[in-house]
Amino acid sequence: MKKISLIGSTGSIGRQVVEVVKNHPDEYKIVGVAAFGDRETFARQTGLLKPEICALASEDFEKALSVAEYGDIVFNAAGGFAGLAYSLRAVKAKKTLALANKETLVCGGDIVMPLAEKLGVNILPVDSEHSAIWQCLNFDRKAAVRRLIITASGGAFRDLPPEKLDAVTPEQALAHPTWKMGKKITVDSATLMNKGYEVIEANMLYGTPYADIETVIQPQSIIHSLVEFTDGAVLAQLSYPTMLVPIQLALSYPKRLDLAVEPMNFKKTFALDFRPLEREKYPCFDLALRCGEGGGILPCALNAADEEGVKAFLAGKIKFTDIYRVADGVIQSTENGRADSYARLEEVDRVARIKAQKIIESL
């Protein structure tokens, strides 16, 4: 039986982790639980799971961090920059890390990846796109490839002309055409900032140069990503949109277990489309790639600025297109430097948020 510490238990991914564990009581036991501030959901979960240790980060952050030192696998589903601290704690404790927190690699990949390599810690990708690549590589993150092809749904506004984006509402941005996700990631899917982050993560996880990572629109969200090998063969991973598949695989690896999700139906006619990514329509995607290629502290500053911009948009304080203006303004005023410690990144995050707030107030 694998013992799991679950970070971010009350969020969308965290709740699905609990569902997977409940469906396989002989395979898994959750021994540690940490969340931020949803007391009601947290109380229900801890009452059901009866973990050895549990903590709300909003009340005792240090105790919540210590949850990442328990069990065989730390499943990091925390949201935001705080997720990096949990990942670092898990890696230092030499725990296998099932990673659903983007900020770990976007902000702190330069710290986390070398440390994991040094300590022999396995990092298992949970994002559907990175899990798809991992599967196509037969679970060998160091396999030689020609290209990684990451798919994107295109978000809520993929069919909307760019000149109409100024007038869209938060409610429209949250109406994702194929996935059900949290608010922040749904807005990031509409700007395609999220996809830019995934390219940065792919570079960190697989060591693939940015020039060899492509992004295409796959409107049905059935092909989750593809890998082109050096001989020209291309493998893809397909399933209907659900996070249960990559969540369970990260826990069951190297085995595959039964999972009650809708199977692909090849007895009916259907089509899978690919569309080129219109980069001029998604300036946040370009900005994320520029920051990724620039490296250092730029991705961390971008993440903080984007979080503040999305929060302001959802609160009705700025327009959808202002999210880019906030993020770009922060990056333009940020002098790059080395991302060489958590303390350094914590300061970058703090300063970037202050800059973002000033830009928001001026819009």
Image (tube, rainbow, N blue to C red):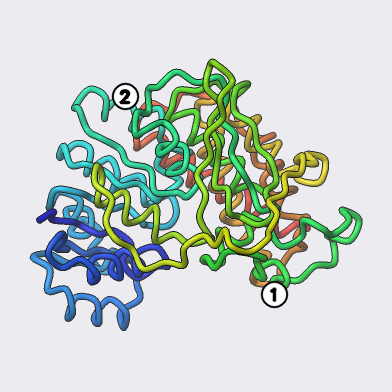
Crowding at dot 2, Cα within 10 Å, few <14 / some 14-19 / many 20+, comes out as few
The answer to whether residue 159 is seen in the rendering is yes
Question: Residue type at mark 1?
Answer: Glu
Measured as percent of width and height from the top left, residue 56 is found at 26, 68
Q: In this picture, is 275 found above or below 11?
A: above
Crowding at dot 1, Cα within 10 Å, few <14 / some 14-19 / many 20+, comes out as few
Residue highlighted by disc 2: 114
What residue appears at the point 33 percent right and 63 percent down from the top-left corner? 259
Q: Quadrant of residue 282?
A: top right
Q: In this picture, is 94 found above or below 182?
A: above
Marks 1 and 2, how far apart at CA:
41 Å
Task: Find residue 171 and name its label.
Answer: 1
Quick check: 175 left or right of 253?
right
Measured as percent of width and height from the top left, residue 137 is found at 41, 31
Secondary structure beneath label 1 = helix
Measured as percent of width and height from the top left, residue 75 is found at 28, 53
Quick check: 102 left or right of 149?
left
